[in-house]
Image (cartoon, rainbow, N blue to C red):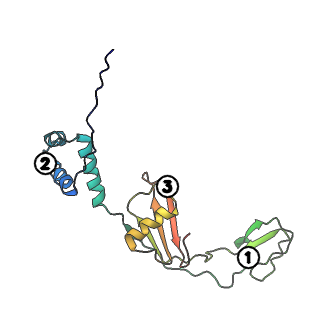
């Protein structure tokens, strides 16, 4: 028996220069141009040319941030009053020890604690920036921080950066408190 072996010629993946891609994309963006016709005329696959077009559009859009206007800052009361029973919040703490509400005994009992109402200053935020491009919610804080660094050069202290997903129904917040990232 004679065996016939047919070998395919080695097909190398073609590489195209950025200039060539830009030239093809520019032709495709002209009014009335057919992407398939331009691709066929240049010996290219139309899907590849469409991918080049979408990559060129994405490259034009650099991710940015828009500042969010904050209302005037209100300072937390330095000496919160716990005398008004209607203005306190009670939280059960499963520890058999006395409460230390700002150095004033609240008389709530060994398993209760009182907190004064109003804003409690934990992390100072001077600016809030809203991302203009969506962020994949599976991304961790390192990817969000990379986007902040790409735009600003570094994370600014006392700033919050808000990221939304593509649908706009979920948000991720990255906060730099001057010491680290939250």
Q: Count numbered badges in the picture.
A: 3
Q: What crowding class fits label 1: few (fewer than 14 Cα within 10 Å), some (14-19), or many (20 or more)? A: few
First reached walking from the N terminus: tag 3 or tag 1: 1
Along the viewing direction, whichever of 44 and 121 lies nearer the viewer: 44
**Spatial distance from mark 2 to mark 1, Cα to Cα?**
72 Å
Residue under numbered circle 2:
31
Q: Which mark's residue is nearer the viewer, 2 or 1?
A: 2
Q: Classify mark 3: helix, strand or loop.
A: loop
Residue tagged 1:
84
The answer to which of marks 2 and 1 sits earlier in the sequence is 2
Is 77 on the left-hand or right-hand side of 161? right
Quadrant of residue 87 within the rendered picture: bottom right
Measured from the top left, where is residue 92 in percent x and y? 78, 65
Around disc 2, counting alpha carbons within 10 Å, would you say few (fewer than 14), some (14 to 19), or many (20 or more)?
A: few
The disc placed on residue 146 is: none
Of tags 3 and 1, the one toward the viewer is 3
Alpha carbon of mark 2 to alpha carbon of mark 3: how far? 37 Å
Percent x, y of residue 105: 81, 80
User: Seen from this angle, which residue lies furthest bottom?
Assistant: 78
Where residue 137 is drawn, which disc sits there?
Answer: 3
Closest to the observer: 81 or 16?
A: 16
Label 3 CA crowd tier, 10 Å (few <14, some 14–19, many 20+)? some
Q: Is residue 75 above or below residue 182?
A: below
Locate the N terminus by quadrant.
Answer: top left
Labelled pair 2, 3 in contact (Cβ < 8 Å): no
Tell me which residue sits at (19%, 51%) in the image: 25
């Amino acid at each position: 028996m004679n065996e016939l072996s047919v070998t395919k010629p080695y097909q190398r993946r073609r590489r195209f220069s950025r200039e060539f891609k830009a030239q093809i994309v520019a032709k495709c963006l002209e009014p009335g141009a057919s992407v398939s016709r331009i691709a066929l005329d240049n010996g290219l696959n139309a899907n590849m040319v469409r991918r080049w077009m979408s990559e060129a559009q994405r490259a034009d859009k650099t991710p940015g941030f828009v500042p969010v206007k904050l209302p005037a800052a209100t300072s937390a009361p330095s000496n919160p009053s716990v005398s008004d029973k209607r203005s306190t919040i009670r939280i059960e703490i499963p520890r058999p020890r006395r409460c230390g509400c700002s150095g004033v005994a609240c008389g709530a009992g060994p398993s209760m604690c009182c907190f004064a109402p109003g804003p409690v200053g934990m992390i100072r935020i001077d600016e809030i920036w809203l991302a203009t491009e969506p962020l994949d919610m599976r991304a961790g804080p390192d990817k969000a921080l990379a986007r902040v660094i790409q735009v600003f050069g570094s994370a600014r202290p006392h700033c919050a950066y808000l990221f939304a997903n593509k649908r706009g129904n979920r948000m991720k917040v990255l906060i730099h408190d001057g010491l680290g990232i939250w």
